């Protein structure tokens, strides 16, 4: 935290910040509990067309917003991590997003990562250029993915979910808005999860009702490769969410990931509650919860407000784990643990909390 004002002239906010953050400093140590990471590709930002630099930056922010609002642990990796042998192994899920610029070494590592059990979520123009921005004759991963054809979408993509489990959790439609999108023809071994309609401002509903539906194209599909799975989304999902955030995006994103790889910890609660988890050397976990309403305002649209309302009855779920004891790291208050030991109830969260989890050994 910082200020453009001399701290001696504004002692009250600095005192409040110290009072809030001081008790949290005891729980900084440990290592992140890994689940999903975002590939922040500098080479894509630098060489994917000069006008694409800002969208790359916005897409990374959009991915981070989705992580926060879906309440799943997240990290970031960079170009050198993707190119390094076994550099992605710590991460069960990789969000490559619209990583358009990709080297052959990175492509080989992505293939090895998936085939040995990783989950890759790819979007739009992934792998269409090399690491210096020169276009490949054919996008680098298309043959491996089984993409038999690509065309550019022209208007606004809207997803129509066809997978029964996704429809049950998310409804039928997820709007992607103007974020750039690709219409692909996947191979026969792909599993269609959602179709996409490419529509503009025409009276679209009237056409549908008159029996003249817009063409449906494969919009989201998955394909097994070795022990892992690739999910391909034709739209730039993360850029779309930052520019036009909706709860439908969040539900869809969470359902899409958790269907193929269960997170080590999940939070059931409002969008504005953020979650970060650290694993301590003694085997315990420190779960940092923050009631942060500003995170659900559109990026760049911060509003000044001093009102903060406590959030009630949060639930932490830990699939496959058994908690022996859960308590507040700030005041020692015990939290209720379910009979199975895999769920914890937080009765009230005003601003910050650190939930200390001790597991059955």
Image (cartoon, grey):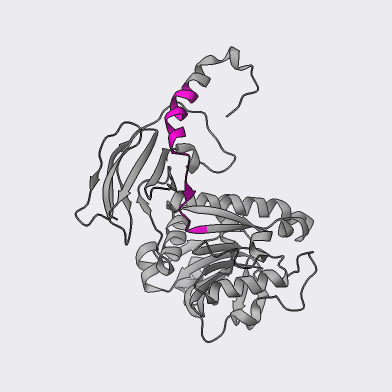
Q: Is residue 31 magenta?
A: yes
Quarter of the figure that contains the C terminus:
bottom left
Residue at 76% across, 69% down: 130
Q: Residue furthest left?
A: 339
Question: Can see residue 284?
Answer: yes
Residue at 51% across, 70% down: 118
Q: In the depicted view, which residue is nearer to us: 1 or 24?
A: 24
Q: Which residues are magenta?
A: 16-36
306 left or right, relative to 105: left
Q: In the depicted view, which residue is nearer to us: 323 or 258?
A: 323
**Residue 263 coordinates in the image, percent (x, y):** 41, 60
**Residue 183 coordinates in the image, percent (x, y):** 61, 74
Q: Residue furthest top?
A: 9
Total numbered labels: 0
Q: Is residue 41 magenta?
A: no
Residue at 44% across, 54% down: 72
Quarter of the figure that contains the N terminus:
top right
337 left or right, relative to 18: left
**Residue 55 coordinates in the image, percent (x, y):** 67, 54
**Residue 157, located in which quarter of the rendered image?**
bottom right
> Compared to 138, does 171 lie above or below?
above
Q: In the depicted view, which residue is nearer to us: 171 or 101?
A: 101
> Compared to 296, does 351 lie above or below?
above
């Amino acid at each position: 935290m910082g200020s453009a004002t001399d701290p001696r002239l504004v002692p009250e906010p600095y005192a409040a910040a110290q009072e809030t953050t001081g008790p949290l400093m005891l729980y900084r140590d440990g290592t992140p509990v890994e689940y999903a990471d975002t590939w922040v590709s500098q080479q894509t930002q630098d060489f994917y067309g000069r006008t694409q630099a800002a969208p790359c930056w916005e897409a990374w922010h959009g991915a981070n917003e989705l992580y926060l609002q879906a309440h799943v642990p997240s990290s970031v990796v960079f170009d050198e991590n993707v190119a390094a042998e076994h550099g992605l192994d710590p991460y069960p899920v990789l969000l490559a997003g619209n990583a358009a610029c990709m080297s052959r070494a990175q492509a080989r590592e992505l293939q090895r990562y998936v085939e040995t059990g990783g989950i890759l979520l790819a979007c739009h123009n992934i792998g269409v250029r090399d690491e210096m921005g020169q276009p490949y004759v054919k996008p680098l991963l298309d043959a491996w993915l089984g993409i038999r054809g690509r065309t550019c979408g022209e208007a606004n993509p809207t997803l129509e979910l066809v997978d029964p489990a996704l429809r049950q959790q998310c409804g039928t439609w997820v709007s992607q808005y103007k974020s750039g999108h690709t219409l692909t023809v996947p191979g026969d071994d792909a599993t269609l999860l959602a179709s996409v309609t490419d529509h503009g401002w025409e009276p679209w509903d009237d056409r549908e009702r008159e029996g003249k539906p817009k063409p449906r194209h494969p919009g989201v599909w998955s394909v097994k490769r070795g022990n892992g799975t690739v999910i391909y989304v034709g739209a730039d999902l993360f850029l779309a969410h930052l520019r036009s955030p909706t709860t439908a995006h969040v539900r869809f994103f969470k359902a899409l990931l958790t269907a193929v790889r269960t997170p080590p910890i999940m939070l059931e609660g409002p969008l504005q509650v953020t979650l970060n988890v650290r694993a301590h050397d003694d085997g315990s976990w420190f779960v940092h919860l923050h009631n942060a309403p500003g995170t659900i305002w559109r990026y760049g649209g911060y509003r000044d407000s001093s009102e903060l309302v406590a959030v009630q009855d949060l639930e932490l779920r830990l699939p496959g784990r058994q908690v022996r004891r859960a308590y507040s790291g700030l005041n020692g208050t015990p939290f209720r643990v379910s009979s199975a030991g895999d769920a914890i109830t937080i009765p009230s969260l005003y601003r910050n909390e650190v939930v200390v989890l001790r597991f059955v050994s």
